[in-house]
Amino acid sequence: MGKVIAICNQKGGTGKTTSAINIATSLAMFGKKIMLIDLDPQANATSGIGFNKHNIQKSTYHVLLEEIELKEILQNTEIPGLVIAPSNLDLTGAEVELVAVLGREYRLKRALQKEKENFDFIIIDSPPSLGILTINGLCAADSVLIPVQCEYYALEGLTQLINTIKLVKDNLNPNLTIEGVLLTMADYRTNLTKEVIQEARNYFKDKVYRSVIPRNIRLTEAPSFGKPIALYDKESLGAKKYEELAKEILGIPLISN
């Protein structure tokens, strides 16, 4: 059965979608079968992996409304072994349409039941909020990966997210764990980056990945070309760091510098 990892942070601008795309890609490049689920109405994971979100006819919205099965919306990507369940703007309606539905928190989990055995990992890109879409992701997930940018106030909003994860664990998904904390947008020229890294490691201990994603111009350019960093510039520092991160997730030892 595939491991389901929800990438989650209600704060915008943390590198959540960039990480979802590039973690999924890097794991696929290690020969794993991967499904990337775009659960964000902005559909940035969909466009960032090479699809025109305006041309998507059937999306995760239709799956959550149980109009069609998940397998009917899966699209192959340029990366062998990686498929995406795309999103589009229709998904904004799901928050309203599901509000009075019994068991609405488990719509994605139910949709995944038939597909989990076909994949090694299922990566969920959650929206930057703690609404019903994110709750669906957390209820369907085995674990949560939290991206944290190395910037001022970065750790402040995490209390609310940790509380939400605890509430979901206590009431809806008792098996939910924290997969790891990923530090992003690191600029080692600043003391602030070093302070945030130290603070995160003090708070989350060994849950913080050794791999830290740097500020990298190639990483920011790649989505506008609809490519993960490994296809856009595989020699860039960003590509190498996401490859390192995939090794950590897979339990492959990293060679110390």
Image: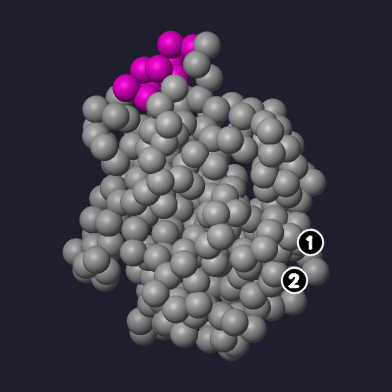
Number of residues whose C-alpha sits closer than 10 Å to that of mark 2, classed few (under 14), some (14–19) or many (20 or more): some
The residue lying at 53 percent from left, 62 percent from top is 32
14 shown above or below 173: above
State which quadrant residue 247 falls in.
top left
Does residue 221 appear left or right of residue 127 in this picture? right
Which quadrant would the C terminus be assigned to in this image?
top left
Chief secondary structure of the magenta span? Answer: helix
Which mark is on residue 56?
A: 2
Number of residues whose C-alpha sits closer than 10 Å to that of mark 1, classed few (under 14), some (14–19) or many (20 or more): some
Contact, CB < 8 Å: mark 2 with mark 1?
yes
Question: Which residues lie in the magenta part?
Answer: 190-198
Which quadrant would the N terminus be assigned to in this image?
bottom left
Q: Secondary structure at mark 1?
A: loop
Callout 2 amino acid: Ile
The residue lying at 32 percent from left, 22 percent from top is 198
Q: Secondary structure at mark 2?
A: loop
State which quadrant residue 34 falls in.
bottom right
Q: CA distance from mark 2 to mark 1?
A: 7 Å
List the residue tagged with mark 1. 52
Q: Is residue 102 in view? A: yes
Closer to the camera in the image, 31 or 172:
31
